[in-house]
Amino acid sequence: MEIVIITGLSGAGKSRVAAVLEDLDFYCIDNMPVSMMPKFAELGVATHGRYDRVALVTDIRALKDIDEFLATLDEMKTIGCRFSILFVEAEVETIVKRYKETRRRHPLSVPASHGLEYAVRTETEFLVPLRDIADEIIDTTGLTLNKLQRRLAEHYMEGQEYKPLNIIVKSFGFKHGIPIEADLLFDVRFMPNPHYEENLKKKTGLDEDVKDFVFAHEQSTGFYSRLCDMVDFLLPHYIEEGKRYLVICIGCTGGKHRSVAISYALSEHISQNGYPVDCIHRDIERDLID
């Protein structure tokens, strides 16, 4: 069992780190009391694999006594559980700015007259012993979400492939409703419709002769070329902003012919450019007019 104990300065981004680790298949628990950590470790070991990778977030509210925390770590070692400490910090000025922007109260109780900066500096000094024994230290000052994701992935996914953006291309029929999960949506009902070709009517956009029909028209090829250019432009920017999931929906009337052919071609294009992508045809099995 592997446990990552996330601790550090309030306002430095511990919850954001936990969210990223959750995307990396860690089971995450926020605000874990120090006294409960050994019990949880025992539970995890007893489940024989159910909780193989766990991230526990603890902060100044649960760390009133550093010696108690160190004793807890010793107890966890005797259980046979493997753990590491991830310490999250940021510059004082950055943390003060974040608290002012969110208007949240710093958890450290200090006289109001001392102010927020004093609370941050007091907490920084108090947590020095934990920082000194940390296995990994992350300073989130000026760190974008994408850079944070990559750093955590490099450290905690050694030997595994990191997928910065998971993409789904989905075909659908407008007459069956627009997918509510769509991030990008394109309407291809302006393209010539294979439904009105007797030899293509009962086929789908996965059949070669339907694909050939769709891409035999200038409006289809012109649209598809521009669509690929747009997607190629957008994907790196979505990754830079830290987006983890992207759903591109392409619709025609019934979701059997035109949208299927375009979605399949687009997913192939995205895959050839090195991005992980799944292609889903929501309405391809419906026996309704395209």
Image: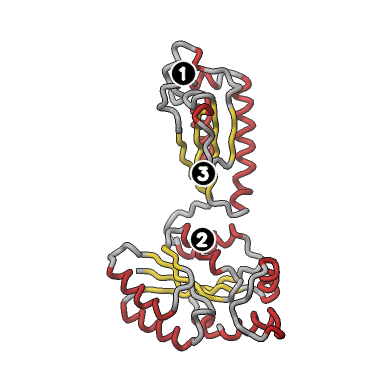
CA gap between label 3 and label 1 equals 27 Å
For disc 3, the neighbor class at 10 Å (few under 14, some 14 to 19, many from 20) is many
Query: Mark 1: which secondary structure?
Result: helix
Total marks shown come to 3
Please name the amino acid that badge 1 sits on: Asp
Q: Which residue is drawn at 47% across and 57% down?
A: 23
Q: Work out which residue is located at the far top of the displayed protein and give it.
A: 198
Write down the quadrant of residue 56 in the picture: bottom left
Q: Residue 20 carries which label?
A: 2
Asked which colour scheme the image uses, the reply is: secondary structure
180 or 38: nearer the viewer: 180
Residue 146 is left or right of residue 1, and the answer is: right
Residue under pointer 1: 209
Please name the amino acid that badge 2 sits on: Val
Question: Where's residue 24, x and y in %?
Answer: 46, 58
Q: Which residue is drawn at 51% across and 75% down?
A: 7
Residue under pointer 3: 167
Question: Where's residue 43, x and y in %?
Answer: 31, 71
